[in-house]
Image (tube, grey):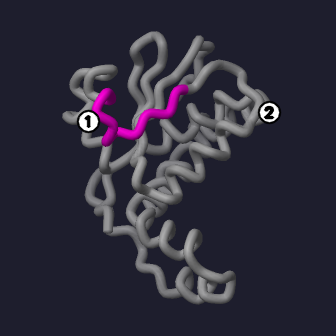
């Protein structure tokens, strides 16, 4: 995956997912390398802004569209979000490389498959309960490129 300079990216994410919203808030607190617009895929204007968005199944994974019209999903979308942060561009370039991108893909699959459970655990419970819950979390049930969202 090659990260190219761009003016802006649009990020389509699950606006009902605590983990997704926390990531969005964290990214927004970072110094910008370029503009990033976060749009919940559930928003009424999302399909108007990105015709055909629904065909990409945004409920399954985050989607990024660059100013140039390139579309990235899952791990590549997460890497683009990091690349939008001035202080994380080097990290994003490393993650986008052939050695680490497969690791980022696997990590994103596990997170995507468990994002609702992770959101419940991390955003509503104390640390000891969080630790206990994580030890009992199932591995991702992946088929091909995607994992089943629970």
| Position of residue 102 in the picture relative to residue 27 (left or right) | left
* Rendered residue at 44%/72% (across/down): 117
SS class, disc 1: helix
Give the camera-side residue of 108 and 121.
121
Q: CB under 8 Å between callouts 1 and 2?
A: no
SS class, disc 2: helix
* Rendered residue at 56%/75% (across/down): 124
User: Number of marks in the image?
Assistant: 2
Is residue 106 one of those drawn in magenta?
no
Q: Give the range drawn in magenta.
A: 37-46
| Position of residue 87 in the picture relative to residue 106 (left or right) | right
* Rendered residue at 50%/66% (across/down): 119
Residue situated furthest front in the rendering: 44
Give the camera-side residue of 146 and 7.
7
Q: Earlier in the sequence, mark 1 or mark 2?
A: 1
Q: How crowded is mark 2: few (under 14 residues within 10 Å), some or many (20 or more)?
A: some
Residue 74 coordinates in the image, percent (x, y)? 43, 43
Residue 36 coordinates in the image, percent (x, y)? 57, 26
* Rendered residue at 66%/37% (across/down): 28
Residue occupied by mark 1 = 56
Q: Is residue 66 above or below residue 28?
A: above
Residue 63 coordinates in the image, percent (x, y)? 40, 36
Residue occupied by mark 2 = 87
The quadrant where residue 134 appears? bottom right
């Amino acid at each position: 995956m090659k990260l190219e300079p761009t003016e802006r990216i649009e990020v389509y994410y699950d606006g009902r997912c605590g983990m997704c919203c926390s990531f969005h808030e964290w990214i927004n607190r970072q110094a910008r390398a370029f503009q990033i617009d976060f749009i919940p895929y559930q928003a009424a204007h999302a399909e108007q802004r990105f015709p055909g968005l629904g065909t990409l199944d945004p409920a399954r994974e985050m989607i990024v569209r660059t100013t140039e019209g390139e579309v990235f999903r899952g791990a590549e979308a997460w890497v683009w979000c990091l690349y939008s942060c001035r202080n994380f561009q080097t990290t994003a370039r490393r993650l986008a490389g052939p050695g680490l991108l497969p690791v980022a893909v696997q990590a994103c699959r596990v997170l995507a498959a468990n994002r609702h459970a992770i959101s419940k655990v991390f955003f509503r419970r104390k640390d000891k309960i969080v630790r206990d819950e994580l030890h009992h979390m199932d591995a991702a049930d992946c088929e091909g490129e995607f994992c089943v969202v629970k």
